[in-house]
Image (tube, rainbow, N blue to C red):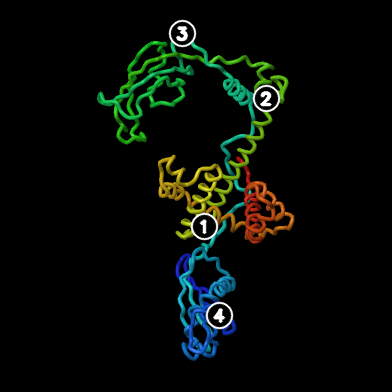
């Protein structure tokens, strides 16, 4: 085979290749074996016509189209490999020459992966907007959060304050007309929680049980119910009860209630500090990785990202998201119904930063190629084991699903990310 590639655009080009006589013969043999079963010829049982008789009656050229279909995929793949290109979409095939006794000549219009001109990607100076330091205040806030979870609501006679819970009946109206969804009975509302329309909760601060008030608010312009957006409403509201949180004392006994593995409050503080240190360290590493890779991408040059790659990335992200939903028992149809959105809405959501994600992948892959990372058998085994654990699948099944080349590619990409991140200098 001879194959050549000629660029016709930034990421477009024409791949020209030929198919030799030996390969053509194999294709024609496959084509004949496929079609002969449908041919009835006097003197022959159906499907038993000889090749010689077929050629005499129909001509060998009758097999050309079927023969080409049989051998084209492998021939195209071989041409792509010989021309050293990476197509990112299905080719548009054109047969230039298909004559008996001659090699067949084919052209394919293809879109290829864009070239990446790398800039600096090692020892990048970056700023990370988070810290690994855990303060006493962080630990105290964690303790307070756990303490509040065990708080009880008790009836109070005094006026309601922010943080209290009021139990209310309410009926909403616009221009004197009640509207759908604007009524509720014995609804518990924590003041200051932001559960209701802006301005609603503030007007209940200072009220007592048994009081009736008119709460006047204006629906936000972007309110989900379009017929109410931007309109003024009045809620006739009755306060049935006012409840305050009764927070238990923070001592050794409460510490044991919060975490049965500890015996004292000091032990709980130490455990929370360790957990917070781990959480902050993970968040810091993730933030560092993000900004370092963003800097490496900024330093690189990609003239143009093919629309085909962006389209593929959008659908990959959508399928990954909807697949995650299905693992939680939520089908795509159910998700769209619950959220009141459509597949087009989700497509637009992922379309927003698809170009950025594709550029990032291209740059990281280019760095992996530039560094010529090698992958050991041990690394492949470890990668397979991690994936098997992550997706709760047998190792053997992961090995069957993922080709070796894909596993090596993923490992090389991880090494590239580690290189960028580990050499970055934090200001």
Q: From mark 3 to mark 2, how far is it between C-alphas? A: 34 Å
Q: Position of residue 233 (x, y in %)?
A: 30, 25
Q: Which mark is residue 259?
A: 2
- At a point 63% along the width and 41% down the height, the residue shown is 285
Q: Which of disc 2 and disc 3 is earlier in sequence?
A: 3
Rendered-image quadrant of the N terminus:
bottom right
Q: From mark 3 to mark 1, how far is it between C-alphas? A: 68 Å
Depth check, mark 2 against mark 4: the one in front is 4
Q: From mark 2 to mark 4, how far is it between C-alphas? A: 73 Å
**Which quadrant would residue 375 be assigned to in this image?**
bottom right
Q: Which residue is mark 4?
A: 33
Q: Which of disc 4 and disc 1 is earlier in sequence?
A: 4
Is the residue marked by circle 1 packed among few (<14), some (14-19), or many (20+) residues within 10 Å? Answer: some
- At a point 34% along the width and 15% down the height, the residue shown is 213
Q: Which residue is mark 3?
A: 157
Q: Which residue is mark 1?
A: 301
């Amino acid at each position: 085979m001879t194959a050549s590639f000629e660029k016709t655009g930034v990421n477009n080009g024409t791949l020209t290749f030929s198919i030799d006589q030996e390969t053509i013969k194999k294709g024609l043999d496959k084509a004949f074996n496929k079609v002969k079963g449908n041919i009835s010829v006097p003197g022959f049982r159906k499907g038993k016509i000889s090749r010689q008789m077929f050629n005499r009656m129909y001509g060998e050229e009758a097999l050309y189209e079927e023969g080409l279909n049989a051998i084209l995929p492998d021939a195209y793949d071989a041409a792509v490999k010989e021309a050293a290109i990476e197509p990112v979409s299905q080719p548009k095939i054109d047969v230039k020459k298909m004559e008996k006794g001659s090699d067949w000549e084919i052209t394919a219009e293809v879109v290829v992966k864009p070239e990446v001109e790398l800039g600096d990607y090692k020892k990048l100076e970056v700023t990370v907007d988070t810290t690994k330091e855990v303060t006493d205040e962080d630990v105290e806030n964690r303790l307070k959060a756990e303490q509040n979870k065990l708080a009880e609501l008790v009836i109070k006679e005094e006026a309601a304050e922010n943080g209290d819970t009021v139990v209310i009946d309410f009926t909403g109206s616009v221009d004197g007309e009640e509207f759908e969804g604007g009524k509720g009975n014995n609804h518990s509302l924590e003041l200051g929680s932001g559960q209701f329309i802006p301005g609603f909760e503030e007007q209940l601060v200072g009220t007592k049980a048994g009081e009736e008030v008119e709460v006047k608010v204006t629906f936000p312009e972007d309110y989900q119910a379009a017929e109410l957006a931007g309109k003024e409403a009045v809620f006739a509201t009755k306060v049935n009860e006012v409840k305050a949180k009764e927070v238990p004392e923070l001592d050794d006994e409460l510490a044991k209630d919060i975490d049965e593995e500890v015996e004292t409050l000091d032990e709980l503080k130490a455990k929370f500090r360790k957990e917070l240190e781990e959480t902050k360290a993970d968040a810091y590493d993730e933030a560092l990785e993000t900004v370092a890779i963003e800097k490496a991408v900024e330093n690189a040059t990609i003239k143009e990202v093919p629309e085909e790659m962006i389209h593929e990335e959008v659908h990959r992200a959508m399928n990954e998201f909807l697949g995650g939903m299905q693992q939680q028992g939520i089908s795509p149809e159910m998700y769209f119904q619950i959220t009141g959105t459509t597949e087009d809405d989700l497509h637009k959501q992922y379309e927003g930063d698809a170009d950025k994600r594709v550029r990032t992948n291209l740059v990281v892959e280019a760095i992996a190629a530039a560094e010529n990372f090698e992958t050991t058998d041990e690394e492949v085994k470890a990668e397979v084991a991690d994936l098997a654990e992550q997706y709760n699948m047998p190792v053997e099944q992961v090995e069957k699903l993922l080709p070796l080349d894909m596993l090596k590619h993923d490992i090389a990409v991880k090494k590239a990310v580690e290189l960028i991140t580990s050499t970055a200098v934090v200001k």
